[in-house]
Amino acid sequence: MLHAFRAVSALLVAALAAVSLPSQAPFASRVVGFDTQGGAGGGIFAPQQALGAPQGGGPAQGSLHVHSLGTGGWLHLGFDLAIVDGPGADLIVSENPFFAGVGQSFAEFGFVEVSSNGVDFARFPSAYFGPSGGPGAFGVLTVGSAAGLAGQTPVRAGSATTPGADPFDVVDAGGDAFDLADLRAHPLVQNGLVRLDGIRHVRLVDVVDGVSRDARGVPIRDHAQGSADIDAVTVLHHAAELTPNHPRVEVVIPADGNFEIRVDDPDGFADLDLATLRVAVYGVPIAPMDLLGAMTFPRVDATGFTARLGGPLPPGFLLQLAVSVRDRAGHRSGAVRQRG
């Protein structure tokens, strides 16, 4: 039976290679390969559903427009547009978590790997901050229980419950954002086998509860009875889109939690469209002044501003913070960081 399944999988891969989106779509455009480990863990096994724009379920429910990786499985997606390292986040992976309480989501994690040649893959560094005993059968974790993993932030883009959500804005879109700059020290990037100015492949690898480990060697815990479910991968920065005039957003969360936000623009403060400033805490968009009103501004200059919390957070306090902004020309920048 297993041999038969693998034979069918091989045929599916060949067939799906011909399934593609219109050229230059800013989303995954083809399925290069996948392995569901024999359908381990159950789910929806339809890799073509990971192509194109996200079709999120919204904050309160998971989308069914997904491909389940299978416990310990993987999915390799190709892109017509080359993802490049721009200011802030460069891609968003949309899984299908949903809120199960204030700041809590049903989480099924996946590693995210990128490649420029389709052979050599660099894995984003990950860190798990959640309970060592695991979240139980329902897999409910605080949003911010992990960094560098997909699968914890509900997807708003494409959902009927959040109409008009911008799939290219890290706050509005939901999902989990990744910054290629986090891979600059990776050995494959250092030796030139993975080029951060030309990423055309993304591979999603299921995290196996209690078995898979983060970059520090810590066991990762999530929903133990299923696998990550992939809805979409969105390109935020590509060569045709990126300009030297993009605004920049940086979120820094040190160990003590006294976080800092820097928003600036190479064309000057006046080029920032502050009406488009957006903030999300634990994946929930809030009015920017609800956060900034509690912060100090140690630096305001000709290009932007720096806002600082002004004091440490309690030990063990988890946090996920997302910030985005546009300039007057409509160029976006956004950043998402966690504190564990």
Image: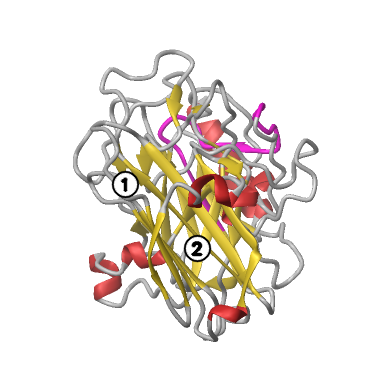
- On the question of residue 28 being in view, the answer is no
Q: Residue at x 55, y 44 (%)?
A: 290
**Residue 57 in sight in this render:** yes
Query: Over which residues does the magenta segment extend?
Result: 60-77
Give coordinates of residue 198: x percent, y percent: 47, 76
Q: Residue at x 45, y 72 (%)?
A: 85
Image spot of residue 219 (x, y percent): 25, 31
Label 2 residue SS: strand
**Identity of the residue drawn at 67% across and 52% down:** 51
The amino acid beneath tag 1 is Ser
Q: Is residue 82 magenta?
A: no
Q: Quarter of the image holding residue 267?
A: bottom right
Nearest the viewer among 211 and 47 is: 211
Query: What residue does disc 1 label?
Result: 126
Near-viewer residue (60 or 305): 305
63 or 176: which is nearer to us? 176
Determine crowd level at label 1: few under 14, some 14-19, many 20+ residues with C-alpha closer than 10 A: some
Residue 201: assigned label: 2
Tell me, yes or no, whether the highlighted magenta stretch contains residue 73.
yes
- Kindly report the distance in space between the C-alpha atoms of the residues bearing marks 2 and 1: 19 Å
Q: Position of residue 70 (x, y in %)?
A: 50, 32
- Give residue 205's position: percent from left, percent from top: 43, 43
Seen in the picture, residue 212 relative to 141 is either above or below; the reply is: below
